[in-house]
Amino acid sequence: MTSTQPRIILLFSGKRKSGKDYLTDLIQKRLTAEMCCILRLSAPLKQQYAKDHSLDYEELLGSGQYKESYRADMIRWGEMKRQQDSGFFCRLAIKHATQPIWIISDCRRMSDVQWFHEEFSDRCICVRVEASEQTRSQRGWRFTTGIDDAESECGLDEGVKFDYIIRNDGADDVLEKQLEDLLSLIKSREDESNAQNNIKPEK
Ligand SMILES: Nc1ncnc2c1ncn2[C@@H]1O[C@H](COP(=O)(O)OP(=O)(O)OP(=O)(O)O)[C@@H](O)[C@H]1O
Ligand SMILES: C[C@@](O)(CCOP(=O)(O)O)CC(=O)O
């Protein structure tokens, strides 16, 4: 593994079109790309799936209809890999990370959360993104049997203690306040971790 040890790992989860990519981009901008990287468990999955099926990897990474038309089959394919090794995509996703703060933007299964807690016990912050079905529909979501009622979407509905829940269907100022709260939480966790490891804060 070539990644360096992170100080903080934000484990983001949330339903389709709740706004995980939108929010993690905003947070990375605030923290800067030098300090913070966004890692997607689905990136190595989509990369290999695209290669095996002669598909457009960039399109699979986007938020459009192209990805949605392959979602059910990608889930099936990814689950086959995970059955052999539940940490398979976690390890690939973090392989080249060098920044001190990592955002994992798409945790979906209990095994994802457990893997990070086992590897990086005290450094994880679990963040849930929530938006109403009405908001998600306005962003293009349509309930799909076999996807929205399956583990890929429901695996973390219960059994996880979230450190912070972001409601992402309100006005911009409501979102701004939540982002500030989350950034403060990250800062205080970083300070705790630095104190424990005897690291002086950066000027
Ligand atoms: N607070 C917001 N204000 C404006 N647009 C938003 C907001 N949150 C999300 N969006 C938009 O909604 C759409 C879906 O958001 P996004 O792709 O971040 O969701 P997601 O949870 O990552 O979805 P998926 O799981 O399907 O990838 C995007 O076009 C995004 O720009
Ligand atoms: C196949 C899958 O990784 C697609 C995720 O796509 P996205 O995070 O919604 O862009 C979902 C899954 O792993 O269950």
Image (cartoon, rainbow, N blue to C red):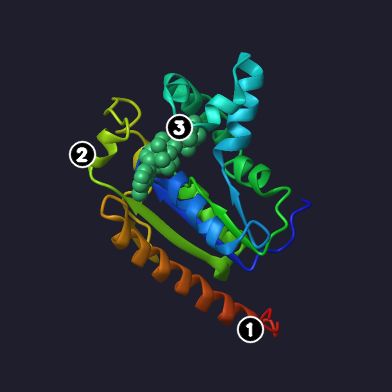
- Queried on whether the Cβ of the residue with tag 3 lies below 8 angstroms from ligand 1, the answer reads yes
Query: Image quarter for residue 147?
Result: top left
The image position of residue 203, as x and y in percent, is 68, 81
Compute the Cα span from label 2 to label 1: 44 Å
Give the mark nearer the N terminus: 3 vs 1.
3
Q: Indicate which quadrant contains ligand 1.
A: top left
Judged from the image, the secondary structure of the residue bearing numbered disc 3 is loop
The amino acid type of the residue labelled 2 equals Gln
Q: Badge 3, how many Cα within 10 Å: few under 14, some, many 20+?
A: some
Q: Residue at x 61, y 40 (%)?
A: 89
Left or right of 155, for residue 41: right
The image position of residue 4, as x and y in percent, is 74, 60
Judged from the image, the secondary structure of the residue bearing numbered disc 2 is helix
Residue sitting nearer the eye, 179 or 122: 179
Judge whether residue 152 can be spotted in this image: no
Residue sitting nearer the eye, 77 or 43: 43
The image's mark for residue 134 is: 2
The amino acid type of the residue labelled 3 equals Ser
Give the mark nearer the N terminus: 3 vs 2.
3
Mark in the foreground, 2 or 1: 2
Q: Which residue is mark 3?
A: 63
Query: Image quarter for residue 43?
Result: top right
Judged from the image, the secondary structure of the residue bearing numbered disc 1 is helix
Q: Residue at x 45, y 60 (%)?
A: 126
Q: Which residue is mark 1?
A: 196
Query: Image quarter for residue 18?
Result: top left
The amino acid type of the residue labelled 1 equals Gln
Q: Badge 1, how many Cα within 10 Å: few under 14, some, many 20+?
A: few
Numbered label tally: 3
